[in-house]
Amino acid sequence: MTESPVDLLKLDRQVCFALAVAARNVIALYRPLLEPMGLTHPQYLVMLALWERAPRSLTDLSGELALDPGTLSPLLKRLETAGYVTRRRVAGDERTLAVELTDTGRALRDQAERIPPAVVERLGMPLSELDHLREVLTAVIAATKNP
């Protein structure tokens, strides 16, 4: 009996498909957790970066989040309108835009601390598996930067 050749174009064999569906589904888990905070998932990622370190330049945030500045700017405008951040030009370097948390933005961190455990609970997977998944995805990201 001969084995049939593996169909490399089967949908369920595609890494891109698994990543796309997983990303969509995981981000959907965040939506009800972020809505009371008035945040979308991309805005949440910006806030995570700013809670780690602020102020930050637009260029620094763009690199950290792997987002084009043109995509990041509208997110920052909405966060500023919500009262979570301020944007200002840096004295002596008018080309640099600094993003800083407001007191309200800093205080929002307390609410956000409940999000990771809630997502882990909803996924129902051991933390060790999720840590391993994050490590593998980080390696995939690195591999796509240096093809």
Image (cartoon, grey):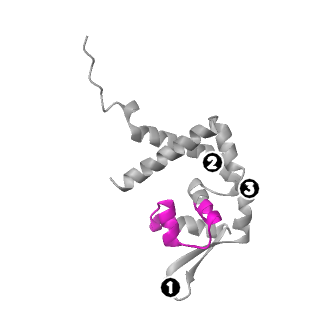
Q: Quadrant of residue 80?
A: bottom right
- The type of residue carrying mark 3 is Gln
Q: Which residue is mark 3?
A: 111
For disc 1, the neighbor class at 10 Å (few under 14, some 14 to 19, many from 20) is few
**Callout 2 touching callout 1 (CB < 8 Å):** no
Label whose residue precedes the other's in the sequence (2 or 3): 2
- The type of residue carrying mark 1 is Glu
The Cα atoms of the two marked residues, 2 and 3, are separated by 14 Å
Instruction: Name which residue lies at 57% across and 46% down.
Output: 27
Judged left or right of residue 72, residue 87 is: right
Q: Main secondary structure of the magenta part?
A: helix
Q: Which residue is mark 2?
A: 31
* Image: magenta residue range: 46-73
Is 70 in front, or is 121? 121
Q: Quadrant of residue 118?
A: top right
**Where 58 sits versus 36, above or below?**
below
**Where 101 sits versus 133, above or below?**
below
Label whose residue precedes the other's in the sequence (2 or 1): 2
For disc 2, the neighbor class at 10 Å (few under 14, some 14 to 19, many from 20) is some
- Considering the numbered disc 1 on the image, is that residue within a helix, a strand or a loop? strand
- The type of residue carrying mark 2 is Arg
Label whose residue precedes the other's in the sequence (3 or 1): 1
Instruction: Name which residue lies at 55% across and 83% down.
Output: 90
Instruction: Name which residue lies at 45% across and 48% down.
Output: 139
- Considering the numbered disc 2 on the image, is that residue within a helix, a strand or a loop? helix
- Looking at the rendered image, the disc whose residue lies closer to the viewer, 2 or 1, is 1
Is 88 in front, or is 110? 110
- Residue 77: x, y in percent? 57, 69
